[in-house]
Image: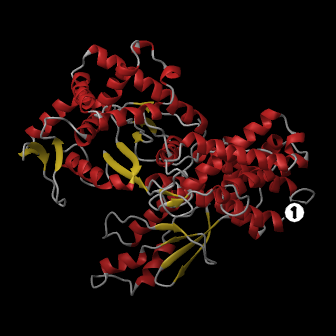
Amino acid sequence: MANEEENVKRKLAKLFEVALKVTVPSVVDVEPLVAACTGKFGDYQCNNAMGLWSKIKGKETEFKGPPAVGQAIMRNLPQSDIIESCSVAGPGFVNVKLSRNWMAQSIQRMLIDGIDAWAPRLPVRRAVVDFSSPNIAKEMHVGHLRSTIIGDTIARMLEFSRVEVLRRNHVGDWGTQFGMLIEFLFEKFSNWEDANEAAIGDLQEFYKESKKRFDSDPDFKERAQKAVVRLQGGEQKYRKAWTQICEISRNEFNRVYQRLGVQLEEKGESFYNPYIPAVLEELTSKNLVEDSQGARVIFLEGFNIPLIVVKSDGGYNYASTDLAAIWYRLNEEKAEWMIYVTDVGQQQHFDMVFKAAKRAGWLSTDDNAYPKASHVGFGLVLGDDKKRFRTRSSEVVRLADLLDEAKSRCKTTLIERGKGDEWTEEELEQTAEAIGYGAVKYADLKSNRLTNYTFSFDQMLNDKGNTAVYLQYAHARICSIIRKSGKDIEELKSMGAIVLDHADERALGLHLLQFSEVVEEACTNLLPNVLCEYLYNLSEFFTTFYSNCQVVGSAEETSRLLLCEATATVMRKCFYLLGIVPVYKI
């Protein structure tokens, strides 16, 4: 394992922690408030003076106000090779300027040890990320795309941060719709046991046909309702038909996951069924569950409706399954953090389920402590008309069609740019996939997930502005600069040295060093857009550096080639965390 190193923000926080203890020994447990700043006074700032002043003023104190507290914090900072200089501004803000030499050496070390040395450390060992979760026998559509992409990126960021992640696909495989599907399977195929994917054909069409029968034929409807009971009662024939339908659907999902490069382990709704009775018994013994209008419910303060855990007909619902899943994930899978990625419409449901789990004593009541559960909500995908994204015939857009379109548009562009003659068919295909799928993912991830986002091929495949296509080009350009220099970059890493004397070299170096704390922030707040913003800004810093600092043929060529390599390395790790395959030449 590479030598791990704490990120800049944490290193500075440790130094300020010492200074704060010496400055105000009477105030205990002061959390150092250190933040990166964009100003001419420094690179980072410690903002504790104001808050401390409000705690000590009026008591026996030598200080005359916040600026004096700031001065004292600055004087009490321990000696450190990471700090070049400090100053105090305004109401006691302590500005820190980092040492160029230390910055250059840190970047150099990362090039030798590898980017994993910059992985953040989170206070959690094992997490569940519950994402994607489509319904069996229904097509994966554009709504599932958001959950799949956002969930995959959160899982990747946590894995990079040394957290063991259980990636869970909580598929809808246990609803009342199965009675209808199974009865229709029996009716349509006399030898239903041999009805494979080829025979059944398009599962979506199969679903629609069976729904039509269910709505129009009362006899069929009654048989379908009985079939649900027989399936849930564990009758062999029904279980076998159910397994068959799930398998066909699973194969369709897996084809999409493969194209997106997403790994998931399925534990669907049905998996938690056997655990529900004991879980409800435990909640009842804790006096959480009571009878109300024939149903069994949990009343929660702050909500005007109760959480129904057993319906009036005795059946279970989402809440019963979700509570059983929380119990299982905590007790069997030993997870400390459970992260649920679904649309914002399900926010209230999860708020209620998590609150019930807190009342049961399963989750910590302190939101900053573990074990905890978090709901990662996201907005709708809209079309150009700002309404829900649908096809012309008002069908939901199939995910597979969408990926095909992105890839074929990229391929066309590459051929128009003459790559059809230069590259092999395989290179053309792979590059079109990397750029096309990457563009779809990045467009989804770059805006705050809580907002609705407008799906537009023209925008996401534009090679200018904040798009994956632009970033892929930027990365390929850096690779080409290094290639064309004719130098062996591995040799330069061990022989050469980085120098950050030019202001634009230093600005680029500082941004590179902030990679780790940005990933940490994106993980802590479960916001992938923070990482996208960092990546886009990185390419902007590089452009400024490259415009003003000659690389090849200059006296600083070795150092600047190493800065190019460091930028490409960090860009590639960002791409990886966003689930995007980098392109080395375009």
Across and down, in percent, residue 403 comes to 62, 43
Question: Which element type, helix, strand or loop, lies under badge 1?
Answer: loop
Res. 437 image quadrant: top right
- How busy is the neighbourhood of tag 1: few (under 14 within 10 Å), some, or many (20 plus)? few
- Where residue 360 sits, quadrant-wise, is top left
Seen at 36% across and 36% down, the residue is 212
Q: Where in the figure is residue 388, as x and y percent of width and height?
A: 47, 57
User: The N terminus lies in which quarter of the figure?
Assistant: top right
> In this view of the protein, can residue 111 be seen by the observer?
no
Residue at 36 percent across and 51 percent down: it is 375
The x and y percentages for residue 137 are 42, 32
Observer able to see residue 33: yes
Instruction: Point out the residue furthest to the right here.
Output: 553
Is residue 450 shown left or right of residue 99? left
Residue 513, horizontal then vertical, whole percent = 63, 57
Residue for badge 1: 550
Q: What's the amino acid at mark 1?
A: Gln
Q: Nearer the viewer, residue 131 or 458?
A: 458
Depth check: give the residue in front, 324 or 562.
324
477, above or below 419, in the image: below
Residue at figure coordinates x 7%, y 45% from the top left:
290
